[in-house]
Image (spheres, rainbow, N blue to C red):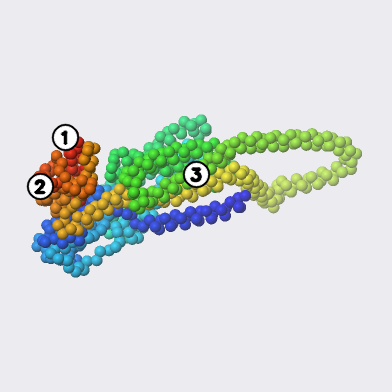
Amino acid sequence: MTQTIAPRVRTLVLLLLAAACALLAGAGPASAHAALTGSDPREGAVVDKAPAQVSLTFSESVSMDDDSLRVLDPKGKRVDDGKPSGTGGTTYSVKLHAGLPDGTYTVTYQVVSADSHPVSGAYTFSVGAPSETSVTVSGQGAGGGFVGGLYGVGRYVSYAGFAVLVGGAAFVLACWPRGSGVRVVQRFVVSGWLSLTAATLLLLLLRGSYTGSGKVADVFDLGLLGEVLQTKAGAALVSRLLLLAAAALFIAVLFGAYDKREDEERRDLTFGLAVGGSVVAVGLAATWAMSEHASVGLQAGLAMPVDVVHLIAVATWLGGLTALLVALYRGPADTPVPALAVSRFSRVAFGSVIALVVTGTYQSWRQLGSWTAFTDTRYGQLLLVKIGLVAVLVGVAYFSRRWTAQLAEATPAVARAAAARRAEKGEKGEKGEKGTGKASTKASRNASAKTGAKAGTKASGNAKVAEKESGTAKGPGTAKGTGGSQRAAQLARQRAAVDAARQKRQRDADPNRFGLRRSVLAEAGIAVVLLVVTTVLTQTEPGRTEEEAKAAGTSSAGSSAPATGAVTLDMPFDTGSQNGKGVVRVELDPARVGVNDLHLYVERPDGTAFDIPEVKVALTQKAKAIGPLPVAPDHITTGHWSASGVQIPMAGDWEVAVTVRTSDIDQVTISKNTQIG
């Protein structure tokens, strides 16, 4: 049976590795998690005179150094003062030299987003009129190249090591305490600790170069390493190393004192180990939650603990599943995984799946923001793949639960049959001993007449045999005696190996255990791909951010297309009264920081203008807590209101809210966002 299993196992493992490599190859460098949502001057803009500064607005806060934001003239010479500063919230600016000549200027930026990922890009604007430029913008984004690829590998290994460490230890404590003495299980958990520790050290060394120049030589720059330690990502990695030291002590107790205790004493120690291990696991998971997606954006205070629960559930399920697979295939024949341990893990895995569904639903809402983001963004598409893999994994787990139930039912029957065979064998032995006694009595009577004739011959023969076996008469005899003891030891080892092989064949011949092993192997294979997809998700720009960036780009392009730079917003309304339906059109000109003109038109659904008793406008920038700034337009003609001198103090994403009153008691407030440069 085992000879037929091995080729299948090797084939499936090779297929899983190929699938994982394909996903790794397609992942590419880490995508930007902070998107550029606005700039002043805008991309491609032609301004009459040189601006005093260049400002960039991102979807979330970023960190910068002196080289993060650069402005280059047509010859590639820097024309900024090299001291970028934040002007509030997510907007950053750098001052330009005075008296810049006409021509095309290039703005480049390379920053680190709040969730620890590098962001880079470039665009051009012109003063007076466009001109030729010698500046070439590299197509490679931040976080790419050899260092970026190595950093990505370190991330994959760290997630896998965390799952193996936490899941393997949880499997031993919660499901199979006797597994703490099984060598392959010990090696499995220790390998998870070693992998996570090595990957964390690698990420810490690569971090400075990964977010900066991307050069291999900078990996060993101690000054750069000191700067990394002062960042949020660097502090998270150092904290992870300290927690791994505590994890090493936990592993030493689990596979040392815990393994040597008796069952009752072991139960007393289990509670303490469970509490200590849970604290370490939560701390390790928090090093990701506090430095990546969950730490920024909506409801960060709730998102971080939810992310910790999600990570621990993933590790408990996938890591425990892999530990079970290792024990089923590589465990010793004399210590098979009992059906009770498999049943316990089945319940633990079910609880982990419930936690994954709840936390995953919240995370999906938080990162996507809309149903269309599932199909329109890369993050949403990867999330659909992950959901599909989880569904398949749950389906395969259902079959594993069936095999577990059958194995649990078959185990008592197998034990009773084995006991019956042992009892039957013992009964036959007793009968054989009685028969032997009767035959020996009869033989002694028949041989009594011949005893005197052969007594001398037998005595001499026995003496020679005794002399050879004892080996005490001569030196060579002693050597022969030593060789005999070595031969006996060798035979004992061979008998033990034969017995172990026989026990393994008997164990593998159980159809229920064979079916369980096969289904668990399929689960583990899907889990490997699922873990890869999950890691790629952590490096992908969230769908909500991507859609906001697209909307900002569309708004910017739409507002900069007209010669005047005006923004037009159409907002349908319905106050619920008779003749209470229509469309409000708001025009803001030139839609830039400073003085603007506002025109408002009210039309019926058929397009004819009509008057209403009252209309009010308010401008709000929620990101920086500005507003609402009220605007009271004057009635000009039928269906037309206007206001001049509307002051917009800052660039960014502004909400334009219009309150429409169609009668004394019927009114409604409608709003729409637009990008103000």
Q: Please, what secondary structure does the residue beneath circle 1 have? A: loop
Lower sequence index among marks 3 and 2: 3
Q: Amino acid at mark 2?
A: Ile
Label 1 and label 3: CA atoms lie apart by: 60 Å
Is 646 situated left or right of 177 in this image? Answer: left
Q: Which residue bears the numbered disc 2?
A: 636
Q: Position of residue 173 (x, y in %)?
A: 47, 37
Lower sequence index among marks 1 and 3: 3
- Mark 2 nearby-residue class (10 Å; few <14, some 14–19, many ≥20): few
Question: 81 or 609: nearer the eye?
Answer: 609
Label 1 and label 2: CA atoms lie apart by: 22 Å
Q: Position of residue 463 (x, y in %)?
A: 78, 45
Q: Which residue bears the numbered disc 1?
A: 664
Please tell me whether mark 3 or mark 2 is closer to you in this view.
2
The residue at the point 43 percent across, 38 percent down is 354
Q: Please, what secondary structure does the residue beneath circle 3 have? A: helix
Label 3 and label 2: CA atoms lie apart by: 67 Å
Give the numbered dot on residue 395. 3
Q: Amino acid at mark 1?
A: Asp
Give the numbered dot on residue 361. none
